[in-house]
Amino acid sequence: MTDNGNRLAANGNYINGNGHNKQYETVNGRIIVTEFANGAVAGHESQLDTVAEDMQAKLESPELLHQFELDFEPVDIDAAAQSITGLLHAIGEDPNREGLQDTPLRVAKAYQELVSGYTTDPKALINNAVFDVEYDDMVIVTDIEYYSLCEHHMLPFMGHAHVAYIPGKKVVGLSKIPRIVDMFSRRLQVQERLTRQIAEFINEVLEPKAVAVVMGGQHMCSMIRGVKKHDSGMTTSAMLGEFKTDRELRNEFMMHIQRSSKQ
Ligand code: ZN
C-alpha cells in the first residue's frame, strides 16, 4: 500500500533506528501502527491473557456510563418522526407530497443511527479485548475516519482521528480504538469535547501512562452556510499524562501523524 510516498507498506514489519520492532497493518482500510521494543504486538491477542472481571465491572458501572454519557434512553422514533413532519411544515413544505411521505420516518431512523453512540454498550464494544501485559512503548492508530454531528446546527462534521497511548499494564485490541472513536462521534458533539472524551475513556479503561488524541475536522455548518469557507478545517488535540509533560514524546506522535497525510 503506497497511497502516500512516505507511508510504509501495510501488514509489514521493520526495525527502526532505535532497534524497535514496528508493525503496520490495516483494519477496515485504516492504518494501524504498533511499536513494541520487545517485538510483541498487541494485535496478537491470543498470546495475551485477558484482564479479569474487574474490567467488565468497570465497563458496566453506572458511574462510568454516566461520566461518558452512555446511559441515554433509546431514540423515540415516533416522536422524532413527528418533529420532522413539523419541521417540513415550518419550512413551507407539504409533508404529504409524494417525495416526502416517508421522509419523517427515514430521518428519524437516520438520526437513531447518527446518535447511537449514546446507547453503545462499552462492555460489548471492548468484548474482553483488554489484556494484561508489560509494554511501555507507544501504540499508535492513525487515520481513523469519523463522522459526527455538530451540536450547534445538527449538521455533520467529519475527518480523521489519530490516537496514541503508552500502556501502563493494559493494552486493548487494536481494532477497538476506531470503535471507541465511533462511540463518541455518533452523537451531538463539538470537536473539542469529542477529542477529550476519546482520550479520557482510554485513560479510564486502560490506565495508561499517557494518551494523545489529535483530530482534524471539516464542519458542514461552516462549509455550506454562513461565510462558506469550503476548505476551513479545524484541528483539536487532547494530551494526558506523559504526552502533556514530555515534549519529545509528543513530537514523536506528531511525526507519525504527519507521515500519514490525512487530517
Ligand atoms: Zn455547527
Image (cartoon, grey):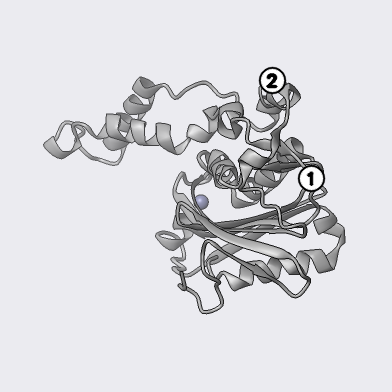
Of tags 2 and 1, the one toward the viewer is 1
**Where residue 125 sits: x, y (%)?**
56, 33
Q: Is residue 216 visible?
A: no
Q: Viewer-proximal residue, 22 or 107?
A: 22
Numbered mark located on residue 256 in the image = none
Numbered mark located on residue 62 in the image = 2
Would you call the spot at circle 1 few (<14 residues within 10 Å), some (14-19), or many (20 or more)? many
In the rendered image, which quarter contains the C terminus? bottom right
**Where residue 86 sits: x, y (%)?**
32, 30
Hey, what amino acid is under mark 1?
Pro
The answer for how far apart the CA atoms under marks 2 and 1 are is: 22 Å
Would you say 243 lies left or right of 120 here?
A: right
Q: Viewer-proximal residue, 51 or 209?
A: 51
Residue under the point 71% across and 21% down: 57
The residue indicated by pointer 1 is 208
**Where residue 116 sits: x, y (%)?**
48, 33
**Where residue 43 sits: x, y (%)?**
61, 48
Where 110 falls versus 29 (above or below)?
above
Q: Can you tell which quarter of the image residue 143 is in?
A: bottom right
Residue under the point 77% across and 48% down: 167
Where 196 falls versus 26 (above or below)?
above
SS at circle 1: loop
Would you call the spot at circle 2 few (<14 residues within 10 Å), some (14-19), or many (20 or more)? few
Q: Viewer-proximal residue, 75 or 202?
A: 202
Residue under the point 72% across and 57% down: 39
Hey, what amino acid is under mark 2?
Pro
Q: Of all residues shown, which one is farthest toward the bottom? A: 5
